[in-house]
Amino acid sequence: MGQPNVGKSTLFARLTGTSLEAGNWPGKTVERREGRVTSAGRALTLIDLPGTYSFSASSEEERIARDYVLQERPDVLIVVVDATALERGLYLLAEVLLLPVPVVVALNRTDLAERAGAPVDARALSLALGLPVVPVVARTGLGLDALAAEVVRVATHRDAVPPVAFEVDHATAVLLQRATALVAPHVPAPYTAGWIVHKLLEGDTEMVDLLRSWLPRDDHAALDALIVDAEAASMAVAGARYAWAGRAARSALAPAEARVGRTSWTDRIDRVALHPFAGLLLLIALSFGVYHVTLVVAGPMQDLLEGWVMAVGAWCGARAAGLGTLAQEFVVNGLFGSVGLLITFLPVLAVFFAAFALLEDTGYMARAAFVLDRTLSAVGLRGKSFLPMFVGAGCNVPAIFGARVIESRSARLLTILLLPLVPCSARFVVLALLVPAFFVAVAPAVSVGLIGLNIAVIALLGFCLSRTLFRGERQSFVMELPRYSVPSLAAVSVSVWTKLKAFLHDAGTMIVVIAIAVWALSTFPNGSNGQDASIETSYLGRIGHFLEPLGAPMDLDWRLIVAIFTGFIAKEVVITTLGVLYAVSGEDALTEAMTSTISPATALAFLVITMLFIPCVGTVAAMRREAGTRWMLFGTALLLVVSYVFGYGVYELASLLGLDELRGAGVTEGGRG
Amino acid sequence: MMERLLARVAVGGSVHLGELADELGVTATVVRDMLRDLALRGYLKPAGGDCSTKCGGCAFSTSCHGAPSAQTWTLTDKGRRSAAGAA
């Protein structure tokens, strides 16, 4: 017998060969198979019992298996257990062992378990169970002779079945003992008192009725008085069965590895990756590595592409010259300033996405999520709050919709308010492209620092808000971590391609449209004079100058302010806005243009605000839909204040270090006002 | 064993199956089975954590990293009473 899909039928067919006869169980539609096998001169008759998860008689198959074992009392019961799902088989075995039948365990699929990296030590299992365990591979016939020989041996010697020692709490133990003593005199063969009491606690109605029909009426009340809380007792007994199965499995799996002095790679890596401190350090180091690799690998490719795009732009501009200066400007600055810039993003994004896809495919990202969650939960963000957060690592919009799964209103609101601070992929794009432009040598450190700041702000706000506005109950988050595996190149390529395509489709379209709009706003109403002065007096210039006092404390010029506000539409737009604005003002490359006019302190303040402010208009719309207009406004105002305060704070800090005076060579007037 | 697991879930916070298995001295598979069993008995309920069915209509499904294989469990009223009683 065994659970369904443990390879029982294959094993049966292999053992009995041509002697197999099939029919139906009397009065049932379930197939009954019988066959013969000869071992050590003894002819054995084998019956294939239907697959069953328990002896609860909740299906016809389970009833047939149960009744057969109870009433026919086979000489030996072969319990087939799947080595790749050891515990489940053992859980069934724990129930079978309540019946006085000699058992031989056929441990099937040992080859698959070995291949899966979790070999089962049959001898250790046999010791833990106190039963004969024979490893077999039904598919190939491996170990079948040994199984038949063991069955003959057990049938001949009639080994005493060891009683299963289930560890239950004292109250349950006393209850089991008293109930067994009470019913024992009345339980007829083939049933056993111990098994009947277990069924009684489980609430098996058929057995309860049967037991009542056997018991004298006086004992009914005594039994009812005894079993006050059947549910608690049933849970205790089920827990004891799980514990028994779990401990036996553990002794057959883990200690075997320990004995030969090796642990699995997954365990070894996890000792570091899941450690509260080391895990966090590893996460920071890996993020650092990803940015570094992106810079080193994609940087030269980006430069090369930039050259080509500019050359093609100039060539197209020359072709368009005949259509007037405005058309030429549109082609060179408007079209190539946006589409061209988009093309030069691609190598950076490809390398960046590939690095993350590699980490994801190894199984590490689940650990990263876990370590981060644990860090965040230390400051009041609990359980489910976290899940949309990490979907948020892709995009804040679905993450906010994902917060719907949180039942508690306060926890949901808190999550929705904090989600826009989770660095989304658009922010990663901004980091990957802008940080190297400002901080060539220390770009990875600055990038990681900025992500760290976002997480720190989430933690800080979470800590404050969960103790003031949003008090909620704690929830538990149980995570299943996949095994580490060698990443598949195909999976990584598919992931990179899908993400690039999505970027080009979702963000790209918007980037081009907004870049052209920004170009138009920066060109009109002056037209195509092509002078720096024209931007200053353009619509965009006027808006920028109007808002400039806001940026003055951080030395943010009007172009950076405009960039921050266009980033409200979509974060990636920040880059194109800067590209268009700086290209228009006569600089060649964005990098040179910006490093020459912006101090590191201002650049830091700008990046901090960009990272902390509302990620995109879609996020705001999602916040409104999920939390209502009032909370959307509160959230937006909160982020505005938080980003401004932190931007200013970082600027002041950097100024203390003298970073506000450093600038690249060749400071131009560039519209700094 | 099941009561201990229920009490542990009631503490809250994030925990992975391996940790629970170590704490209880069993294997991760048994912990997973017990959690499901507790849910069947009405002490726990799975709490979302799976947006696979929502991706169809989501404009960002392709740019979303996807949820890690994770399950969040919350106590039901029955579970809360039971955990409070045990404590």
Image: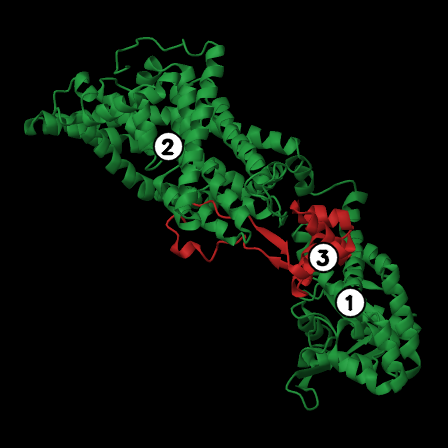
Chain colours: A green, B red
Chain to which mark 1 belongs: A
Q: Which residue is mark 3?
A: B30
Discs 1 and 2 carry the same chain letter: yes
Q: CA distance from mark 3 to mark 1?
A: 17 Å
Please tell me whether mark 1 sits on a helix, a strand or a loop.
Answer: helix
Quadrant of the image occupied by residue A274: top right
Q: Amino acid at mark 2?
A: Pro
Q: Which residue is mark 1?
A: A234
> Residue drawn 67% across and 56% down?
B32
Q: Amino acid at mark 3?
A: Val
Please tell me whether mark 3 sits on a helix, a strand or a loop.
Answer: helix
- Quadrant that contains the N terminus of chain B: bottom right
In this view, the residue in front, A345 or A113, is A345
Of labels 3 and 1, the one closer to you: 1
Residue A192 in sight here: no
Q: Which residue is mark 2?
A: A347
Quadrant of the image occupied by residue A273: top right
Eyeballing the image, is A452 above or below B61?
Answer: above
Eyeballing the image, is A414 above or below A591?
Answer: below
Q: Position of residue A593 (x, y in %)?
A: 30, 17
Residue A86 in sight here: yes
Chain to which mark 3 belongs: B
Q: CA distance from mark 1 to mark 2?
A: 61 Å
In this view, the residue in front, A334 or A123, is A334
Q: Amino acid at mark 1?
A: Ser
Q: Position of residue A174 (x, y in %)?
A: 90, 65
In this view, the residue in front, A406 or A319, is A406
> Residue drawn 53% across and 39% down?
A359
